Amino acid sequence: MIGHMPLIRMRLARKRPKAVWVWVGITNLPWAAQWHKFSDLWAHPEIIIEPSDNPKSLDLRCLTGLQVHIDGNDTTDRIYRVHMACMEAGAKDVFTLHKGELIWDRGEQVGIS
């Protein structure tokens, strides 16, 4: 997992971003690992879930109470497992867009036209 440590430091300082972007399987996003160096990105930090990360073993407590947006180019199953891991970590809302399907809250799916 990349980009989570600055978010953890932010949360420990009692700061709360507006939302967090979580990228699954997309590892070529240089700004996602460096978001904390640009103050205009502090309201929307980014985390990359790497291909070697197991969604069940990720410590996502830094997402507790936050709105989370997930996107990625990994398999639907893996992205869905990251979605559920965010929910289990206590994220307030989780919005996941993958292959034209929006998944939110407790895993409900709605097609997008």
Image (cartoon, rainbow, N blue to C red):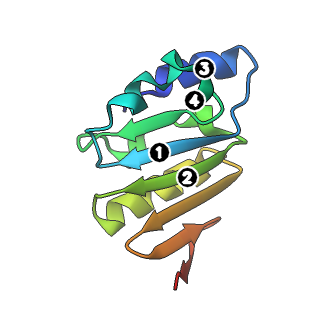
Question: Which residue position is annotated with label 4?
Answer: 41
Identify residue type, mark 1.
Val
Write down the residue under mark 2: 69
Query: For the residues marked 2 and 1, what is the alpha-carbon distance in whole angstroms?
Result: 6 Å
37 over 57 or under it: above or below: above
Residue under label 1, please give it: 22
Residue 51: quarter of image: top left
Specify which label sits upstream in the sequence, 4 or 2: 4
Q: Residue at x 64, y 19 (%)?
A: 10
Q: Is residue 14 left or right of residue 21?
A: right
Inspect this view and state whether residue 107 appears.
Answer: no
Compare marks 2 and 1 and give the one earlier in the sequence. Answer: 1
Q: Amino acid at mark 3?
A: Ser
Q: Are marks 2 and 1 in contact (CB under 8 Å)?
A: yes
- Disc 3 designates what residue? 39
Marks 1 and 4, Cα distance to the nearest angstrom?
14 Å
Q: The disc labelled 4 sits on which kind of residue?
A: Leu
- Of 17 and 78, nearer the camera is 17
